[in-house]
Image: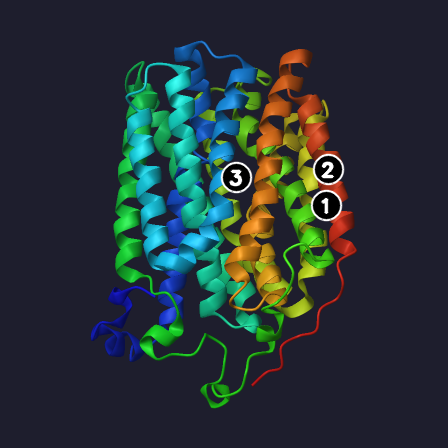
């Protein structure tokens, strides 16, 4: 717990007209907007112009995306320990700061090697911000509310995609090095996110004399049901089951995110501005992809929610893989958009349901590490397939088959008992 959490302002925060947990949730949305939405999902819009300027092939484009996930993968393993040492508030702000600085430096880079190295740092910063913020949400919200809260947090990526889909084509059109201006602009926005999150976040409700959202103060003296899971083994069957599901999501969604814009431009002949408009549409639709499935999972269970989400994603990948009229491309974008960020929000709530508060960050960090392996494999193999076949059909078919497997594994999750309403 950092000393800043114990200031006299804590009593003021506790007396706000709304529970401060909802303010923390808004800061979490801003965090995801910066660390993932701008730090990662902007790449799909930037790659076509970068690839042309630097003469990159599909494999090299995929490798740049993979570099981000390499950094992300390494950092998730230590994010839980760092959070325990310096507090979630500090690590989130520091992670966003690293994302911002690396993006600003990418705007000045002249070679693929330098861009790749800097994008590894972007991935490290993304992990140091993302894993702790999802753990903080699970601490600030009880089991009955955390799916909804996590759902609102992850739509930060949707807002970022809307922004990138409109801003990046405009900045790129200003001059032949417009993609550098885009990196600079996005880096400055992430820098602002870092400062705001540091000012708003607190490490736990107890820091300001509150209970988690959805937990009655009359039960404050009673042990929470989840605390019995504080000894949940890292390699228990249920943790490995969750990790396998998250791996499949990481592998499949990143193929779509990284290459759908490039596929629309190079395989289907769309202009960059038109592809950007469709990418903004994904962002707009994705604004419901966190809260709605999150609320559904709170009410009907994480198992049912994950099963449905993976099936819809599999449909999106299949429709864009097959040689169908453009109408089916639009349907694919719609299917992807409405469930785009559902899995991370449901998974963070699922892990928190199984793990006690002392284990949330560590176990979520582990399943996110496995998720990161999927993200590394996905874009590289998709780029390799595209280079060998000449288009992205085989890559999207691969994503379809693995997403369908994710739906089956989700269906096989054990049914959970609900936390009693107090």
The vertical placement of 172 against 165, above or below, is above
Mark 3 to mark 2 CA distance (whole Å): 20 Å
Q: Is residue 59 visible?
A: yes
- Give the residue drawn at x 63%, y 18%: 384
Residue 253 appears anywhere in the view: no
Q: Which mark is residue 406?
A: 1
Sequence-earlier tag: 3 or 1: 3
Q: Residues within 10 Å of mark 1 (few under 14, many from 20)?
A: many
* Location of mark 3 (residue): 73
Residue 201 horizontal/vertical position (percent): 33, 61
Task: Indicate the secondary structure of the residue bearing disc 2.
Answer: helix
Determine contact: label 2, label 1, CB under 8 Å.
yes
Task: Give the x, y percent position of residue 178.
Answer: 31, 20
Secondary-structure class at tag 1: helix
Q: Which residue is mark 2?
A: 402
Badge 3 local density, few (<14 within 10 Å), some, or many (20+)?
A: many
Does residue 3 lie above or below 244 as drawn? below
The colour scheme applied to this rendered structure is rainbow
Q: Nearer the viewer, residue 53 or 366?
A: 366
């Amino acid at each position: 717990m950092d000393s800043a959490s114990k200031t006299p302002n804590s009593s003021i925060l506790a007396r706000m007209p709304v529970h401060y947990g909802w303010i923390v949730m808004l800061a979490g949305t801003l965090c995801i907007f910066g660390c993932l939405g701008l730090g990662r999902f902007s790449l799909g819009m930037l790659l076509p112009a970068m690839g042309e300027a630097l003469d990159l092939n599909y494999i090299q484009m995929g490798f740049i995306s993979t570099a981000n996930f390499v950094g992300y993968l390494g950092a998730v393993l230590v994010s839980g320990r760092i959070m325990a040492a310096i507090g979630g508030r500090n690590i989130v702000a520091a992670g966003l700061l690293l994302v911002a600085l690396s993006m600003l430096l990418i705007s000045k880079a002249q070679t693929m090697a330098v861009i790749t190295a800097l994008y590894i740092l972007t991935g490290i910063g993304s992990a140091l911000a993302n894993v702790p913020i999802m753990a903080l949400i699970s601490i600030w919200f009880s089991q009955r509310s955390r799916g909804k809260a996590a759902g609102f947090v992850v739509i930060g990526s949707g807002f970022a995609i809307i922004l990138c889909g409109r801003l990046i084509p405009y900045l790129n059109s200003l001059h032949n090095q417009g993609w550098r201006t885009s990196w600079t602009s996005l880096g400055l926005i992430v820098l602002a996110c870092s400062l705001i999150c540091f000012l708003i976040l607190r490490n736990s409700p107890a820091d300001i004399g509150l209970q988690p959202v959805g937990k009655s103060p009359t039960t404050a003296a009673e042990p929470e049901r989840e605390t019995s899971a504080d000894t949940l083994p890292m390699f228990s069957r249920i943790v490995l089951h969750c990790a396998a599901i998250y791996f499949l999501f990481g592998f499949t969604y990143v193929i779509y995110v990284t290459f759908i814009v490039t596929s629309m431009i190079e395989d289907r002949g769309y202009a960059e501005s038109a592809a950007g408009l469709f990418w903004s549409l994904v962002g707009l639709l994705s604004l419901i992809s966190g809260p709605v499935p999150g609320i559904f999972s709170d009410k009907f269970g994480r198992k049912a929610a994950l099963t449905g989400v993976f099936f819809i994603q599999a449909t999106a990948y299949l429709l864009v893989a097959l040689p169908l009229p453009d109408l089916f491309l639009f349907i694919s974008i719609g299917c992807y958009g409405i469930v785009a960020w559902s899995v991370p929000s449901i998974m963070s709530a699922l892990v928190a349901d199984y793990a006690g508060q002392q284990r949330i960050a560590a176990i979520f960090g582990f399943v996110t590490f496995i998720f990161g392996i999927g993200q590394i494999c996905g874009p590289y193999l998709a780029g390799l397939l595209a280079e060998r076949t000449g288009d992205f059909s085989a890559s999207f078919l691969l994503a379809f088959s693995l997403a369908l497997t994710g739906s089956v594994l989700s269906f096989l999750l054990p049914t959970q008992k609900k936390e009693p309403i107090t």
